[in-house]
Image: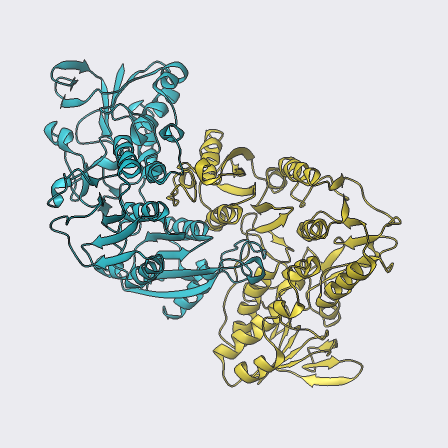
Chain colours: A cyan, B yellow
Amino acid sequence: MRLVVVGGVAAGLAAASRARRLDESLEILVLEKSPYISYGACGLPYHVEGRVRSLDQLRVYTKEYFARERRIEVRTEAEVTRVSAARREATVGASERIPFDRLILTTGAIRDRCCVLGGNDPNVFTIDTWGDAERLQRFLSEQRPKRAMVLGAGYIGLAAVEMLRARGLDVDLFEASPEILGRACPWLTKLVAAHLEKFHVRVHLGQPVMRIPACDVAILTCGLRPNTDLALDAGIELGRTGAVAVSERMETNLTQVYAAGDCCETRHLVSGRHVWFPLGTTANKMGRAAGATAAGFPERFHGIVGTSIVRVCGLGVATTGLSQPLARQEGFDAVSTAVEGLDRARYFRGRPVHVRLCADKRSGRLLGGAVVGEYGVEGRINVIATALSQRMLVEDFANLDLAYAPPYATVWDPVLVAAQQLAKLLH
Amino acid sequence: MRLVVVGGVAAGLAAASRARRLDESLEILVLEKSPYISYGACGLPYHVEGRVRSLDQLRVYTKEYFARERRIEVRTEAEVTRVSAARREATVGASERIPFDRLILTTGAIRDRCCVLGGNDPNVFTIDTWGDAERLQRFLSEQRPKRAMVLGAGYIGLAAVEMLRARGLDVDLFEASPEILGRACPWLTKLVAAHLEKFHVRVHLGQPVMRIPACDVAILTCGLRPNTDLALDAGIELGRTGAVAVSERMETNLTQVYAAGDCCETRHLVSGRHVWFPLGTTANKMGRAAGATAAGFPERFHGIVGTSIVRVCGLGVATTGLSQPLARQEGFDAVSTAVEGLDRARYFRGRPVHVRLCADKRSGRLLGGAVVGEYGVEGRINVIATALSQRMLVEDFANLDLAYAPPYATVWDPVLVAAQQLAKLLH
């Protein structure tokens, strides 16, 4: 029985590893089109920044490791150009045919550089792959540009801003929509924009860039879409988001063909709707479930609550669930409230932390939240994310038994204060 | 209608404030036996350490603030010596009689200095009240002792160790039980003891001190018990823990007499059993519910999951729910597992974080956890605490959508890895 996995980064290798663990007898082959496998793509901006000296530091495992320790064969520079589900074979390159019994597609996402005129100019970069990061890092070191523009204020755009400022470049950030991080949340946008401006980043919101103007260097972080060409060609159905539709067990519409990671959509556990929310953590979890299912021991991945975090110029910006405007679009009778508190006791150099929570007035259920601050952002957003996954009521959330000691928190944590205030709006 | 509140620290003032907010017409009187009200008692060790320069920094509000802003009369140095529920009156001092319609008891906890011989010696201190902290701070500054002993390795004992080491004293820590933090968890004890020894603290476990030996200064952190004398005298029933028994609405067995805070027991939401777990955060929440109920707008406080955190010599030590031995005592078929991971990416100076999780084999339910590390401890324990309050299954916990970015976490957070490993023990 042979399992072929297309793609050798997060989802693909998680799938292969999980399948091996559950079935020792399976023959497992991973095909990766690039020369690189198993690396932490979220660390790429930090390589460009200079914090990660060598890209090797981002490598998790080598091909040899997989062969030796997990009996998983990994081939790099092996691009799968076609999949025939009927013939049970994948084509590598022009003509090499590779038979499979079970197949897992983890083709990821691709960035469409043609989304803007000039997107292919030599001073325009992306930071999605190992190769991208190497090229950009070399360009910045050799050409020493002074002024940069970043297109897109999603989390990759913000990570790019942090990296460019750390290297001392002058930065203009452009975003087509009027919002930062695509949350339709003016509160969040205002907080982040004010912080960026303090760090001399010029923020241009609601300004779609049609053509990249003359500048020293530009980073393209918009135009990301699920890489579904192979899937479509093979007859695999896409969902309403344009990404591959999979069951909770990562099954596609084709028998014994599975998919996982950034090429797939997943269920948003707050709205109940399918969404495309490409993130490394989710890719890993989907990969695990796909590998287990492909190995004949089906596991479920129920979905996400849409948690993300990014650091930009020292500020942590984290969101989960739905913002009030997004919740209204989903048909909730959404109300929200924001509070500012301290991340810990003032005499432990407590710093401001901003918390926004959103709830459904009809059910009293928590729907989402955002946390912004220099410290203690990740822990607080994770508490909200955990509550969302359990469909927790605001009233119960306000009484959560959270840890308190002066070096770590204040007696009434800002997330609890926000919940108390939100509870008042529910009656 | 007059509400009298006995006690003016956490629970008492939370109760009075909540009652005022819900009923503008109520006459509210708070009686506090000491000269001090409304201060963060958890900050007292940090005043002794020198980090909190003036005790005033720990004061939240003044009497005048309560009178002016909340129309709550606060009397200090007004010790309630008797309560007669039948006559609806409290006695202050020898004979002053104060009538009430509703009463909230927040008499807190007291430390029994007679639990050890020599407990009343002039070089033996506690750090429970404002007065305690002032006396100890003065003693340390004036007498400049070199060697200290701390009795009790609960969280106050550990905070005392941190404070004494920060002041440069040589410290011996004595604990009667074989465990640190009373968790019956050898794993936790070993981690913390090893850390303390690195900081030259001599740890003596399983060594009950019968008589305090000659030493420069001793800090007594054992022998804490609920202060129930007034309640007992008034005919208020205690629970099996020896603390005041209250309903979820903070009602005692006497009509319109309520209790809240460290003098009360509360429900442990994991075991379902009543426990005595005196902490400031819980006292505040109980106080709020008591105030609302006393004002005629009953609110419920369902209970706790037993979360606590302490920092000792730079190490964060946090626990929640039940440890495996405690869970077995409660009748669970408990299994547990521990993992070590990094709190964030290595290239962001990620430091080790240790996570232990415990679950019930029969139901698959998460029962408790502990997190130990220099950073990122509070956020991780809070995620576990939130999951416990929702009776979450380990399997679901392992798929939580937690925030990931290299400055804040690793792709597979140690708490998720621990849950994955624990899940394997459940089948």
- For the N terminus of chain A, the image quarter is top left
> How many circles with numbers are drawn on the protein?
0
* Nearest to the observer: residue B135 or residue B204: B135
Task: Specify whether residue B342 is in view.
Answer: yes
* A207 to the left or right of B427: left
- For the C terminus of chain A, the image quarter is bottom left
Looking at the image, is A142 positioned above or below residue B305?
A: above
What residue is shown at x 15% (from left), y 44% (from top)? A240
x and y percent of residue A376 in the render?
A: 47, 52
- Quadrant housing residue A227: top left
* B324 to the left or right of B409: right
- Quadrant housing residue A47: top left
x and y percent of residue B287 in the render?
A: 57, 68
x and y percent of residue A345 in the render?
A: 56, 60
Looking at the image, is A229 positioned above or below residue A177?
A: above
* B349 to the left or right of A189: right
* Nearest to the observer: residue A288 or residue B47: B47
* B407 to the left or right of B70: left
Task: Specify whether residue A398 is in view.
Answer: no
x and y percent of residue B19 in the render?
A: 53, 76
- Quadrant housing residue B184: top right
Looking at the image, is A83 positioned above or below residue B215?
A: above
Looking at the image, is A285 positioned above or below residue B88?
A: above
